[in-house]
Amino acid sequence: MSFSVLPADGGSGLQHVIGSCELNGEEGYPLLVNLWKRGSCKAHSTHSNFNFFLWTELQVELRNMSSPSLQQPSFLLANLKADATTKPLIQRCQDLLKIIDEYPAKELHLIFPWLVENVFGSLDGVISGWNLRLLHSRSNEFNLVLDFLSPSGPMMKLVYKLQAEEYKYEVPVNYLPGPVKACIQEGVLPDCPLFHNKLQFPLPGVLTLNVALNPFEFFMFNLAYCLIAPRNCLQPQLCSSTDSAYFVLVDLYLKYFLPIEGSVPASPFTDSRGSVAAPSPRASSVSFAGYGVHSPSLLKHHIFHQPSVNADPAAQEIWRSETLLQMFVEIWLHHYSLDLYQKLQSPQEPFNPSEEHVLVVRLLVKHLHAFSSSLKPEPPLSPAHSPPHTSPLEEFKRVVVQRFVQQKLYLFLQHCFGHWPLDASFRAVLETWLSYIQPWRYTGEKPNAQPDQNRTVPDKWEPFVHENLLLYTKLFQGFLNRATRTDLVNAKNALMVFRAAKVLAQPNLADMIQRGEAQCSAVSLIGAHTSITRI
């Protein structure tokens, strides 16, 4: 039903046409009748001028109908909230399993934001949720929680069920990474395509800006944010952070959506329209194939951001993998704006990652190296045959480290090197750095029988060293600056110096670094010569 609105006085104070609304008869007719009964307007089936104030009022009405928080009360949600304070977790999970299986998406849509908050905790830290970061393997609820939240468990089945209906869920811009939030507030398009075309303008009288995420994005955002959300009730760790339910869950999701072997499993939920589809492709997308084997190096090109996955339907099979990785990287690592990179200043807001945070980042680094190294070798080309088709997942493996992680991880580590306390807890940061600059440790290949002191770095890794030169040189310099201010009488501090020296003393690694620096110097000289000749 297409309509426009005229003031009740017949036309005084008319504004020019802003647009029209498309409403089906079931929703549109009662709304227009209600507005008419209030004496605000007359509805017409043809386009004409209408009063801007009334149009704003109509937008509010439409938002009221579509927003789950403003809809009619959900008795299912009310019952679940009551059960959350009275029933044990095992019984609540059993109830949720039946509800997810039996209820339609329309009802599940109303409980989804509450359920996500109930599991992961609120973004402001007031609600602690299931305390996944404190739940360890010795707990009776550990396996129950992992089964419910696993990538193939009931919670993800709910996500896919809602994804099929294209529902949206809002997240306040204030909780986005500092650089993304700054871009949005300044009216600039964020560099990360994940947040493009998602801004929701507030209702009249509301000052909070939100981004609208699809169910999969909303779930992954909350999973990632759970690591950095303030938790006033967190007690001192009695067990290792790597033994927590949260750490294990992140590992499960990385292995599921970034598989080293095979492909990403299809959605466990299908409806009459078939398997769950990817979100609408982004207009600025280009093919992975255009990136080539070697991405621009961190040293030569500084910050370099490629568009996201292409609109080719074949590439949509990995949209979940890309979304998961982008969300993890943005929430965990992206705390600097692009201009602050070259100035090497502090983040835009206070940023003090915990040891647990760094350990999860190391888990991400190690898995991405293994994922990237599982790229199948390309068969030799023959003159009579065209290049073989490469799957989107294989192309993703080819560019994943350089394109998604390289620059943001460098900034993250640089901040930690400069601001971390001068004590033994720095070991988590050190090992994350050493993991990243040694991708050959995560190839799955059996190391040769050479002693450690004689083991050389395979020649095929020299391009990686050159593309990540600052992580070998600038960060090593930062580590030495720390070491000179650290109490090396302490055995744990001395061990960290030994670890760094042992890694960087690997035979032929220093030669690779020197060749990379020589190439950069040559490029700089050529550029300077070109500039001089043009004057």
Image (spheres, rainbow, N blue to C red):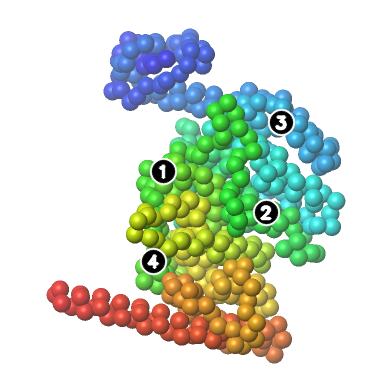
Element under label 3? helix
**Residue 281 in view, yes or no:** yes
Query: In 3D space, how far apart are the residues under numbered discs 3 and 1 (Cα atoms)?
Result: 32 Å
Q: Please rate how many residues cluster around mark 1, counting C-alpha atoms within 10 Å: few if below 14, some from 14 to 19, many from 20.
A: some
Mark 2 near mark 3, Cβ–Cβ under 8 Å? no
Residue ID at (50%, 55%)? 394
Disc 2 marks a residue whose amino acid type is: Leu
Disc 4 marks a residue whose amino acid type is: Pro
Element under label 4? loop
Disc 1 marks a residue whose amino acid type is: Ala
Mark nearer the N terminus (3 vs 1):
3
Q: Is residue 209 above or below residue 307?
A: above
Given the current orientation, which residue lies at the most extreme left position?
A: 535
Query: In 3D space, how far apart are the residues under numbered discs 1 and 2 (Cα atoms)?
Result: 28 Å
- Residue 4: percent from left, percent from top: 36, 16
Which residue lies under the disc numbered 3?
101
Disc 3 marks a residue whose amino acid type is: Asp
Mark 4 near mark 1, Cβ–Cβ under 8 Å? no
Query: In 3D space, how far apart are the residues under numbered discs 3 and 4 (Cα atoms)?
Result: 47 Å
Please indicate whether residue 265 sits to the left or right of residue 134 in the image.
left
Which residue lies under the disc numbered 1?
311
Q: Is residue 386 above or below residue 342?
A: above
Q: Quadrant of residue 91?
A: top right
Which residue lies under the disc numbered 4?
296
Given the current orientation, which residue lies at the most extreme front position?
A: 384
> Which circle marks residue 174 in the picture?
none
Mark 4 near mark 2, Cβ–Cβ under 8 Å? no
Query: In 3D space, how far apart are the residues under numbered discs 4 and 2 (Cα atoms)?
Result: 31 Å
Mark nearer the N terminus (1 vs 2):
2
Which residue lies under the disc numbered 2?
252
**Residue 468 in view, yes or no:** no
Query: In 3D space, how far apart are the residues under numbered discs 4 and 1 (Cα atoms)?
Result: 23 Å
